[in-house]
Image (cartoon, rainbow, N blue to C red):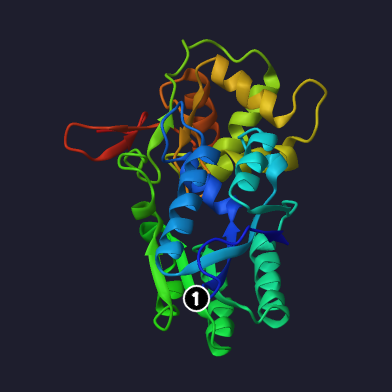
């Protein structure tokens, strides 16, 4: 466990800070300028937090930050160096299919520290998930002071309800003025493209891919890319030179579809948009749904061959 050189009077209270760095990184990543560094901004946050505690006659003696550091965008060494400079020990938690791996490790360490180090009377949790509510409750029940630090707009209301007997600090107040750019609303396009010039699909299998798109996702105006790729794999399989991603690329190139990157929380995502004016798309839709439906002047739909 990381130790900090004591500061202040001998009688100062001792504190431990436990950081869900995985979530902190992803939040800051979406709120800094293009040239900013999440590690540097997190460093400002740690220093401000330490100063805030010192003003209350409390000194940090232990610190840990949990993340799959190898999977972060920032250079791993830079992140770890920044943490060590603030006397916070980086704890590597490998990313798995279970999103709460970091939460679990932090919770286990908090309870273990509570039991083994009675001299630590203040716990600072830099985290915002509702999963941490039982930890807050367990620490408060043993007479510990608990300070939850998080960005209020992304803090779980459930966790806030469980800090009534503790303290909550809005992390945004600990950062320099204008350190964060205005947040992009979830679902907003952050990277978009125009449909390519219309041309015939290069391969017959591209028509098969369009059929999958229309049969299974035709009811949606925009299609999440990940489930579409899975469905293409299930329906068409792995044909040499035509894996699901290359099929989507073919359809992009001929102007039948386009991809758009959207703002998500905590992760951004990609959607696929279909060009309803593309001849191949029209052909596939007619094959699947029958005669083409067109609009009349009075707004009522009729088949192409309907008698009026």
Q: Residue at x 49, y 75 (%)?
A: 146
Asked if residue 231 can be seen in this view, the reply is no
Examine the rendered structure and indicate whether residue 299 appears above or below residue 53. Answer: above
Q: Quadrant of the C terminus?
A: top left
Residue that sits furthest to the left in the current view: 298
Residue 218 placement (x, y as % from top left): 50, 41
Element under disc 1: strand
266 or 80: nearer the viewer: 80
> How many numbered marks does the figure carry?
1
Residue 169, image x and y in percent? 39, 64
The residue furthest right is 240
Q: Nearer the viewer, residue 256 or 144?
A: 144
Q: Which image quarter holds the N terminus?
A: bottom right
Residue at x 48% of width, y 47% of height:
27
**Residue 192: which quarter of the image?**
top left
Quadrant of the rendered image containing residue 99: bottom right
Question: Dot 1 surroundings within 10 Å: few (below 14), some, or many (20 or more)?
Answer: many
In the rendering, at what x and y percent does residue 270 appear? 52, 36
| Residue beneath the point at 75% across and 23% down | 242
Point 69% across, 78% down: residue: 117
- Asked whether 131 or 151 is in front, the reply is 151
Q: In the image, residue 98 lies at what x, y percent?
A: 70, 60
Which residue, given by chain and number where applicable, does mark 1 sit on? 146
Q: Does the rendering let one see residue 191?
A: yes
In front here: 144 or 85?
A: 85
């Amino acid at each position: 466990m990381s130790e900090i050189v004591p500061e202040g009077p001998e009688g100062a209270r001792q504190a431990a800070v436990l950081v869900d760095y995985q979530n902190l990184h992803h939040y800051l990543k979406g709120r800094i300028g293009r040239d900013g560094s999440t590690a540097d901004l997190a460093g400002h946050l740690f220093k401000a937090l330490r100063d805030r505690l010192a003003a209350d006659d409390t000194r940090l003696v232990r610190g840990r930050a949990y993340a799959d550091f190898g999977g972060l965008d920032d250079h791993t060494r830079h992140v770890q160096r920044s943490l060590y400079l603030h006397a916070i020990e980086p704890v590597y938690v490998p990313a798995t299919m279970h999103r709460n791996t970091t939460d679990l490790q932090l919770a286990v360490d908090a309870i273990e520290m509570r039991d083994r180090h009675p001299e630590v009377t203040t716990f600072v949790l830099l985290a915002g998930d509702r999963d941490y509510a039982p930890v807050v409750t367990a620490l408060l029940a043993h007479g510990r002071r608990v300070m939850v630090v998080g960005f209020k707009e992304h803090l779980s209301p459930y966790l806030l309800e469980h800090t009534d007997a503790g303290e909550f600090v809005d992390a945004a107040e600990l950062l320099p003025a204008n350190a964060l750019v205005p947040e992009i609303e979830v679902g907003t396009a952050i990277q978009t493209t125009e449909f390519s010039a219309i041309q015939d699909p290069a391969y017959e299998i591209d028509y098969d891919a369009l059929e999958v798109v229309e049969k299974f996702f035709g009811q949606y105006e925009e299609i999440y890319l990940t489930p579409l790729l899975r469905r293409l794999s299930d329906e068409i399989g792995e044909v040499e030179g035509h894996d699901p991603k290359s099929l989507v690329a073919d359809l992009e190139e001929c102007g039948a579809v386009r991809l758009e990157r959207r703002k998500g929380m905590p992760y951004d995502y990609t959607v696929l948009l279909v060009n309803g004016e593309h001849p191949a798309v029209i052909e596939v839709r007619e094959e699947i749904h029958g005669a083409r439906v067109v609009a009349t002047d009075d707004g009522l739909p009729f088949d192409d061959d309907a008698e009026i």
